[in-house]
Amino acid sequence: MRIKTFISLFFVLFAISTANAQGKKYNIHTVAFYNFENLFDTINGSNNDEEWLPNGAQNWTSRKYKQKLHNLARVLSEIGTGENPNNSPTLIGGCEIENRGVLEDLVKEPLLINKDYGVVHFDSPDKRGIDVALLYQKKHFKPTSFKNIPLLIYRNQEAKDDKKDKEETTDDKNEVTTDNRVYTRDQLLVTGFLDGEEVNIIVNHWPSRSGGEKKSSPFREAAGRLNRQIIDSIYKINPNAKIITMGDLNDGSYNKSVKEGIGAKRKKEEVKQFGIYNPFEEMFYKGNATLFYRDAGDIFDQIMVSEAFIKSDYSSFRYWKAGIYNKPYMITTTGQYKGYPLRHGANEIGYSDHFPVYIYLIKEMK
């Protein structure tokens, strides 16, 4: 009899506990990053954009450009909608962007215009003119400062050539000038208030693997060190700073540029004061990917957060969970590249050669 009474009491207490948990409400925001892959307009600019003109190699017409914008807008409007009532992401980092104009066109797309996105963008020294940028929903995020921080790297930083280190096929080349500087993308730092809480965002697109992974690795290692310097400069001002660093790193979460350069950790319990947590490392070891090369998948697109985002209480915005957005319509269904991201081809305007990534930030509502 006592056992039956105990069991009954247990289920009553469990039901009450569950009801209380379910009764909690959270303010939720999605933060995303997407490599837009060659988001060029059809206007001849001062950058090396000849390939992406109506009479260029890609035969890049207004019709194709408009379809590309529509495709990107569809993806951006849907990321995080499964668990975020605000629908599309509050913050979107992007790369492979020709200029501010293409972003202004993108945020005016019918699927995005009602979200009223603002744009933070600087022209980078990259010779193809591809830049990084941040889109933000104006009603939720108020920028207070933003700056582009150059990555100064030089040809003599390369590792010695290794014949076994084959060059990867990529549109993204590391351009070199007579002064031996490798002109690549700046790192974009934006500080602002997310529904009243200060957040610092760094948007990255690190040097490519053009010339081979090993030969080009020192460039990305330098990018990782610069990223860490930016993070440390923020921590000096505020030891409890909330920092998000994200981008296409052209390296995996396990590479030296990320593990040593940034010092990112795979598990929350490994993160100490002033540390950085990378949820995409665990996702990689579980077999997930944002891009593929020679049938091998990897996660070059990553979003990492500072220690302040992974505290156990939800009295202010905390990291909840991460994901890769790879719906069936974004995936190649036939041929040699079946299962790869559906990118632009001769007969089809796709989305990107990368899948976007995202995280949720949540805060308990009082």
Image: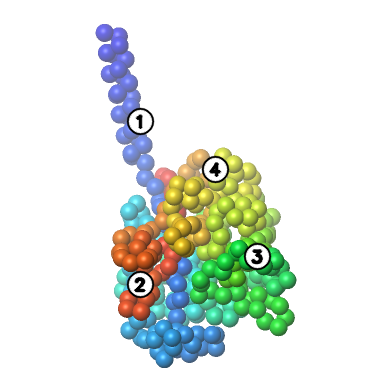
Residue for badge 1: 17
Helix, strand or loop status at disc 1: helix
Q: Residue 285 or 160: which is nearer the viewer?
A: 160
Numbered badge on residue 162: 3
Mark 1 or 4, closer to the camera: 4
State the residue at coordinates (35%, 30%): 17
Is 25 left or right of 231, judged from the image as shown?
left
Query: Please, what is the three-letter code of the amino acid marked with disc 1?
Result: Ser
Answer with mark 1 or mark 2, whichever residue precedes in sequence.
Answer: 1
Q: Position of residue 14 (x, y in %)?
A: 33, 27
State the residue at coordinates (55%, 88%): 46
Q: Is residue 145 above or below residue 82?
A: below
Q: Is residue 362 above or below residue 331?
A: above
Whole-angstrom CA distance, mark 1 to mark 2, is 48 Å
Residue for badge 2: 350
Mark 2 or 4, closer to the camera: 2
Query: Please, what is the three-letter code of the amino acid marked with disc 2?
Result: Gly
